Image (tube, rainbow, N blue to C red):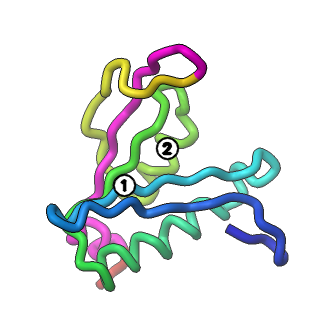
Amino acid sequence: MEVGGKAVGWIALLVDWQNQIAEIATWLGRPYWSSGVNREAKSLVLDYGFGSLNLQRIESITHVENIKAQRGLEKLGFVREGVLRRYRKVKGWHWDMVMYSLLPEEWWQRQGS
């Protein structure tokens, strides 16, 4: 992700080709939180994933306490599926994570297509 020619974060689409699904993952520098950059980047990747790659599901997993990230996913149309208990190990601790998903028909309906 870039703002004014400066790298401010990254976005990845981790594809499981056999099942036609993917996980979308992002990192954005703190000064750009709540700036709309993350939403814009995710929208472009969702268009690409569902349109060009013909994916049937895109997932996103976030920390159970990261309410801002959860609200951002919900604004894009992602549906909360549930809590993945002790799903990720970070700095020696196992953290609960929240699974969200989006299907192509849900995305295109929100886009007015």
Q: Position of residue 78 (x, y in %)?
A: 35, 53
Q: Residue furthest left?
A: 19
Say left or right for 45 vs 77. Answer: right
Dot 1: element: strand
- 113 or 87: nearer the eye? 87
Residue drawn 24% across and 71% down? 55
Q: Give the class, few, some or many, for how many residues have Cα within 10 Å of label 2's Cα (few <14, many ≥20).
A: few
Residue on which disc 1 sits: 23
Q: Callout 1 environment at 10 Å: few (<14), some (14 to 19), or many (20+)?
A: some
Q: Which residue appears at 31% of the width and 60% of the height?
A: 22
Instruction: State the residue in front, 101 or 75.
Output: 101
The residue located at (31%, 40%) in the rendering is 80
Q: Residue furthest top?
A: 93
Report x, y in % for residue 83. 31, 27
- Is the residue 81 above or below the residue 48 in the image? above
Q: Is residue 96 left or right of residue 21?
A: right
Kind of residue at disc 1: Glu
- Dots 2 and 1: beta carbons under 8 Å? no
Q: Nearer the viewer, residue 106 or 100?
A: 100
**Disc ID at residue 55:** none
Image position, residue 63 (x, y; %): 49, 31
Q: Is 76 placed above or below 97 here? A: below
* Residue 69 located left or right of residue 23: right
Where does residue 18 sit, x and y in percent of width and height? 16, 65
Q: Earlier in the sequence, mark 2 or mark 1?
A: 1
Residue beneath the point at 66% across and 64% down: 37
Rendering quarter of residue 86 = top left
Q: Is residue 84 within the magenta segment?
A: no
| Mark 2 lies on residue | 71
Q: What are the residue bounds of the magenta stretch? A: 91-110
Is residue 92 placed above or below 80 in the rendered structure? Answer: above
Which quadrant: the N terminus?
bottom right
